[in-house]
Amino acid sequence: MIIAQNILPPPEIQGRLRHICIGNAQPLVTAGRAVLSGIVKRPAQSAVAVNLLGLAGDEQADLSAHGGLYKAVYAYPSEHYAFWRAQRRAHGAPSAANESEDELPPGFVGENLVIEGVLERDV
């Protein structure tokens, strides 16, 4: 069985892996109720093993929408962080942990791989 093919972008696309982020599922309070979520990710401090179901040390809470053979690792372009900074400012959201005026922390949107130079339209 072939699980993934052509997973690398074409050679003319030059991308960079900026961070590998992992996290444990944990309860988060939203709209007054606690839900189990795996969205909180932090940059890994050492090498991370990759297997068919994801990254070692990373958990997903809602396996109907995340994880498994076809959704094991979530890559997200750092170029989109500017959009989220603007959205947060426009809606008066509190600052994220360690957020400066120009940067959101890696893993901010629950991504495992923070990439640069490869957008969705490129793959």
Image (cartoon, rainbow, N blue to C red):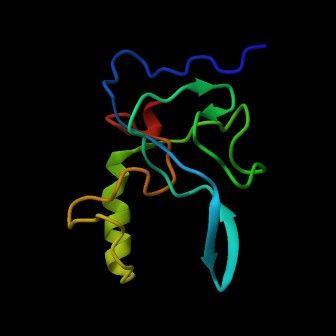
The residue drawn where x is 43% and y is 57% is: 108
Q: Is residue 10 left or right of residue 68?
A: left
The residue drawn where x is 70% and y is 33% is: 70
Q: How many marks?
A: 0
* Above or below, comparing residue 3 to residue 79 in the picture: above
Q: Position of residue 1 (x, y in %)?
A: 79, 13
Q: Is residue 78 left or right of residue 56?
A: left
Q: Position of residue 3 (x, y in %)?
A: 71, 20
* Above or below, comparing residue 24 to residue 33 in the picture: above
Q: Position of residue 76 (x, y in %)?
A: 45, 44
The residue drawn where x is 43% and y is 32% is: 122
Q: Position of residue 95 (x, y in %)?
A: 33, 74
Splitting the image into 4 quarters, where does residue 57 fall? top right
Q: Is residue 29 left or right of residue 80?
A: right
Residue 63 vs residue 8, the one in the foreground: 63
* Above or below, comparing residue 53 to residue 74 in the picture: above
* Above or below, comparing residue 92 to residue 48 in the picture: below
The residue drawn where x is 38% and y is 71% is: 87
Residue 113 vs residue 42, the one in the foreground: 42
Residue 94 vs residue 91, the one in the foreground: 94
